[in-house]
Image (cartoon, helix red, strand yellow):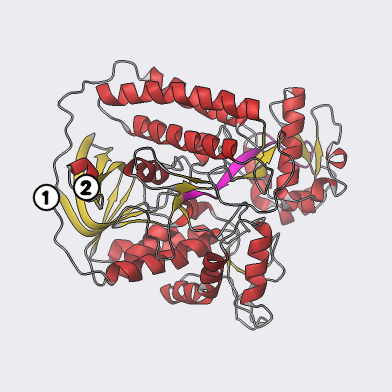
Amino acid sequence: MLQFDTLIIGSGLAGLTLALKLADHQKVGLITKKALLDGASSWAQGGIAAVLSGEDTSQAHIQDTLIAGAGLCDETATRFVVEHGKQAIDWLISQGVPFTKDNTSDTGYHLTREGGHDKRRIIHAADATGLAVQETLSGKVLAHPNITVLEGYMSVDLITGRKLGLSDNRCYGAYALDTKTDEVVTIAAQHTILATGGSGKVYLYTTNPDTSTGDGIAMAWRAGCRVANMEFIQFHPTCLYHPHAKSFLISEAVRGEGGILKLPDGTRFMSAHDERAELAPRDIVARAIDYEMKKGGLDCVYLDISHQSVEFLQAHFPNIFARCLTLGINISKEPIPVVPAAHYTCGGVVADLHARTDVANLYAVGETAYSGLHGANRLASNSLLECLVFADAAAKEILSQPREEPLTLPAWDDSQVTDADEHIVIAHNWAELRHFMWDYVGIVRTNKRLQRARHRVQLLQNEIDEYYAHFHISSDLLELRNLVTNADLIVQSALSRHESRGLHYSRDYPETLDNPLPTILTPPNH
């Protein structure tokens, strides 16, 4: 049995921040199912939204967030995050994060502006902010003597009092699969943090890394935590459609510089959906592409910027130009095949302003959590800020608690199972899930599609539960099990919202209600 004061599951920005804020006072264990930098935080290009300039105000940032959230943001949580923004950025600067500087700015740093923001408030490190932050913090995490990093450890399930037959249902740690040896280890801890990211891989097309399988959300649900607002999945309208171009985004700036969306026969279609055509907001463009693909039975649509010169394209979009060229697409001569893709999970595990969940000693931070900040639609660059602020809040809460000795926990028992004889079952179910979630629970929804998805989810859950009960576990099986749970939560949430709002658009309920409430699901038997 491994033993820590605090166990952090996940190595994104929230997990690394929390580890560093605890490690001077505690023995910290951090597990990540692949390598330290393999999470979604490293992929974040834009930056971090925070009120840094004298020309900006907290109230303006709060207002922009509330407008983007379409009436479902929790105002207290929004204010809490925004008002702690500068402190969070100052901490990153003190850690040595190389943000892009600008001597003409009153902050000394270059601030950019993104969709939905009324002011320039996005601090960034060129166009790879997430990677710069993660590389800086991971170096400090690896060097700290009180932090044990376990790469290649896939969390299996939380160990709760209920599972141990105790009268309380607090969290005592977790079981984790060492993917290098296929052995399950027991990890005991007084405090356990879920920082595992979102569930984008439940969809066929996603901008998320392979690690985004909703593990923390599923484990928390099984442990007895409520989840909220899972129907609100943010889709990016233009992801490169190519078998070898996994999750490569085509920036919205391509449309900003005159890129035209076309059907395979060359017909433009955006003006039929919105008078702003290609320059309409992200959700409208994504819905229009989705509509045209479903109507025509298309695999993709095309984004054409070939009327611009090679020099212009290489100056403005060097990474996109080079990446497409390696795949045989010369964007100066031919259009780019694109599809919308799942981008961000706005809902998650219900957590308070200290990141506490419904289960004692269990916390949720970052994309895994529902803090109330994002409402029905996330404002650009608020996600990394949320990671920083709630990691700090969780650290303070944990350090305020009296120290207890961890329990001696039982070892993982796999004496009643055998080796799986048909791994194809997992691969087939994974493919089926991602296809029907894309077709039935995507950008535009109907009751009939959602009911079809619910039926298929239940069939898959039964198959996977039976497989899980009879065979040795693998990381593929664990991820599939978690994804099916997330799919079920998304479908349940979507079926219960009888309106269209933010990222949830229903043909059966196109109107927006006057008094919206978050969608909160409670696990059965709790």
Q: Earlier in the sequence, mark 1 or mark 2?
A: 2
Q: Residues within 10 Å of mark 2 (few under 14, many from 20)?
A: some
Q: Left or right: 405 with respect to 191?
A: left
Q: Left or right: 311 with respect to 88?
A: right
- The label shown at residue 307 is none
- As for residue 337 lying within the magenta part, the answer is yes
Q: Which residues are magenta?
A: 328-348
Helix, strand or loop status at disc 2: helix
Q: Is residue 309 at least partly visible in the picture?
A: no
Q: Is residue 390 at least partly visible in the picture?
A: yes
Q: Which amino acid type is shown beneath numbered disc 2?
A: Gly
- The label shown at residue 161 is 2
Badge 1 vs badge 2, beta-carbon distance below 8 Å: no
* Rendering coords of residue 189 (x, y %): 21, 55
Quarter of the image where one finds residue 61: bottom right
Q: Which amino acid type is shown beneath numbered disc 1?
A: Thr
Q: Residues within 10 Å of mark 1 (few under 14, many from 20)?
A: few
- The label shown at residue 408 is 1
* Rendering coords of residue 491 (x, y %): 54, 34
Furthest-left residue in view? 408
Q: In the image, is residue 62 above or below residue 157?
A: below
Quarter of the image with the C terminus is: top left
Q: Left or right: 342 with respect to 164?
A: right
- As for residue 336 lying within the magenta part, the answer is yes
Badge nearest the viewer, 1 or 2: 2
